Amino acid sequence: MTVLDGLRVVEIAGLGPTPFAAMWLADHGADVIRITRPGARHVLGLDRDVLDRGRDWLELDLKSPAGLSTARDLIARADAVIEGMRPGVMERLGLGPGDFPDNPRLVYGRMTGWGQHGPLAHSAGHDLTYIAITGALHAIGPADHPVPPLNLLGDFAGGSMYLVAGMLAAIWRAQRTGQGQVVDAAISDGVAHLMAMISGMRAAGAWHDRRGANLLDGAAPYYTVYECADGRHLAIGAIEPQFWAELLRYLEIDPASLPDRADAGNWPAIRARLAGVIATRPRDDWAALFEGTDACAAPVLSMDEAPHHPHMAARGSFAGAEPAPAPRLSASPAVLRQGQAIDAARALARWQG
């Protein structure tokens, strides 16, 4: 049995963070039925989106009485809803959180970039614009300009996973009290919260409010990426003194020959010294040398290479080309399955009782 076995979730089809959250719940056993628009195609033109795995889908025209009635019937029988519409859209359809008084335990998960209220609540946006106002984007990249961190930080870390955490917390409370609630998961809120450690360092005077000048932004010679002889790269994360000593031993650099690394003014010189050594050998030579050591060094692998790394392969971190469910639960492991199209009668029959 999976950990969320028996949990019923209606997902109103959306982009990015909503399907990722629904996928995570489905991976861990929730029975998720995805409501999609008739004939809808993926915005990126994909024949199959990994984020759609794990749940069956039902095509409904929510502007038609029949489609709206089916959606209402499903939500009335559900434990939770996931939707990512702009504020007010679900209410106008008659599918808002206040429209199901006969299902008081309903947990209503709302995934947006800006949240359900605030000056930007009704404005369009994407991951990059959401993280731009949090301070996070400003902190990422080289000194001369910020760099988009894919859409991992906003959509999926600050969005999907905060929605999942909030919904599971609300479901836990609903099971004990019989009372559901709305989970207002805003990407901008989530990313601001993810910045807690960096914000704390800044408040304590241990972080400069500029890029390329801090412990974790690539400026420190012991926490950055170096180019190897073949043009590929080696990641170094030897923050602690004992790991730094181990790194220097493998690089055959005498610690006494380097200036004090505690003085950030010495970082460029130290980095140049390490760069010169690392540039003498190809990436995989360094990877073989550092494998299994405490030097905190690892090869920067491509997306095609990553599934074949011995550690990732041994743990089964990938299922073919797509990621396996995470995290691992010892007594109720997740199950990866594919979904299928179903009709309204089958969906409603499945959730009888």
Image (spheres, rainbow, N blue to C red):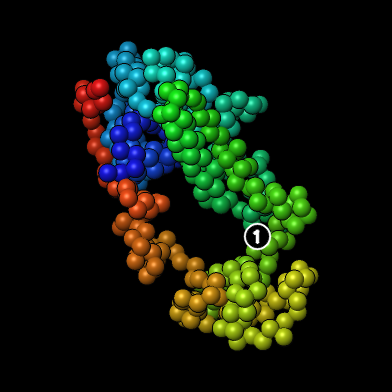
Q: Is residue 68 visible?
A: yes
Q: Which residue is mark 1?
A: 217
Instruction: Identify the image quadrant of the N terminus.
Output: top left
Residue 36's place in the image compared with 1, above or below, is above
x then y, percent, for residue 117: 60, 25
* Farthest front residue in view: 176
Q: Which percent across, then down, holds residue 29?
A: 31, 41
Relative to 278, 301 lies left or right: left
Residue 348 image offset from top left, x and y in percent: 25, 23
Name the image quarter holding residue 33: top left
Residue 26 as seen in the image, left or right of residue 184: left
Residue at 43% over, 31% down: 171
**Whether residue 327 is situated above or below residue 342 in the rendered picture:** below
Crowd around label 1: few <14 · some 14–19 · many ≥20 (10 Å): some
Q: Is residue 235 left or right of residue 199?
A: left
Give the residue type that dot 1 points to.
Asp
Q: The residue tagged with tag 1: helix, strand or loop?
A: loop
Rendered residue at 70%/50% (across/down): 200
Front residue of 232/334: it is 334
Compared to 56, does 199 lie above or below? below
Residue 5 in percent (x, y) is at 30, 38
Residue at (36% x, 31% y) in the render: 9
For image coordinates 39% across by 43% down, the residue present is: 24
